[in-house]
């Protein structure tokens, strides 16, 4: 049986929007069956330190409490700290009864190889270790920084779910897939893109 509390739903986002009926009439907009705030929160910029992380957590909480139910991040933003900060904020909101999972639309991205909290001392060794760990051939990790191989994307979805503390990601983007074109032919790029989307469609079907 599908756990409706695990992702954004029509009823959940409508419930959220009703709490902010005092905002502009067109502030919430219907997209894909969901009520989405016209202002979302991004998590790209900022230092790789605990002070910035604390600020991000407070910002996410304040945004959700103020009528923003669209939160965007990426596994590589601030070396995974942004996803983890979003996860910390969401856990606080849920625990305090200030929001429910089905009210919020959370998006993240995969493609760029993320560091774990901070840049490693030896970047080349880090990349090589990840290639071996994920059983990838070097050509799949273009420039040592970007990969859209199906197995890699599945692994990265798992990392993002853990960072966010969620069961389901509402929107998952291929992060700047055009990066591949700097290293492979257009035909190879299209083949990789097709394989990536096929895997993402399967991930979505699996919940």
Image: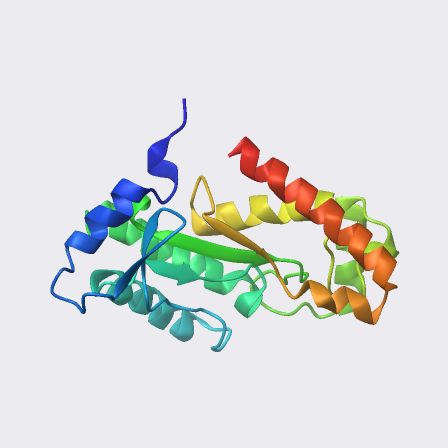
In the image, what residue occupies the spot 74% across and 48% down? Answer: 194
Image quarter hosting the N terminus: top left
Q: Position of residue 112 (x, y in %)?
A: 67, 62
* On screen, residue 136 above or below 77: above
Q: Report if residue 143 is visible in the image.
A: no
Q: Report if residue 42 is visible in the image.
A: yes
Q: Quadrant of residue 123?
A: bottom right
Q: Quadrant of residue 176?
A: bottom right
- Left or right of 184 on screen, residue 68: left
Q: Position of residue 155 (x, y in %)?
A: 65, 44
- Left or right of 167 on screen, residue 182: right
In the image, what residue occupies the spot 72% across and 45% down? Answer: 150
In the image, what residue occupies the spot 61% across and 40% down? Answer: 201
Q: Nearer the viewer, residue 146 or 199?
A: 199
Q: Nearer the viewer, residue 185 or 166?
A: 185
Q: Quadrant of residue 142?
A: bottom right
Q: Nearer the viewer, residue 119 or 4?
A: 4
Query: Outermost residue toward the left?
Result: 22
* On screen, residue 154 above or below 80: above
* On screen, residue 4 above or below 62: above
Q: Position of residue 11 (x, y in %)?
A: 26, 41
């Amino acid at each position: 049986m599908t756990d409706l509390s695990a992702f954004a739903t029509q009823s959940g986002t409508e419930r959220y929007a009703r709490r902010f009926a005092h905002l502009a009439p067109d502030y919430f907009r219907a997209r894909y069956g969901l009520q989405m705030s016209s202002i979302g929160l991004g998590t790209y910029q900022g230092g790789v330190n605990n002070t910035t992380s604390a600020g991000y957590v407070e910002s996410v909480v304040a945004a959700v409490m103020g009528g923003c139910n669209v939160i965007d991040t990426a596994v590589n933003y601030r070396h995974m700290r942004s996803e983890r900060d979003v996860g910390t904020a969401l856990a606080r909101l849920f625990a305090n009864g200030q929001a429910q999972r089905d009210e919020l639309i959370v998006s993240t991205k995969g493609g760029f190889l993320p560091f774990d909290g901070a840049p490693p001392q030896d970047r080349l060794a880090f990349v090589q270790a990840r290639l071996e760990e994920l059983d990838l051939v070097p050509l799949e990790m273009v420039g040592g920084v970007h990969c859209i191989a199906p197995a890699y994307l599945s692994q990265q979805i798992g990392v993002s779910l853990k960072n966010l503390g969620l069961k389901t990601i509402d929107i998952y983007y291929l992060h700047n897939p055009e990066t591949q074109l700097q290293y492979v032919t257009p035909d190879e790029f299209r083949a990789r893109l097709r394989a990536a989307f096929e895997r993402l469609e399967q991930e979505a079907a699996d919940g």
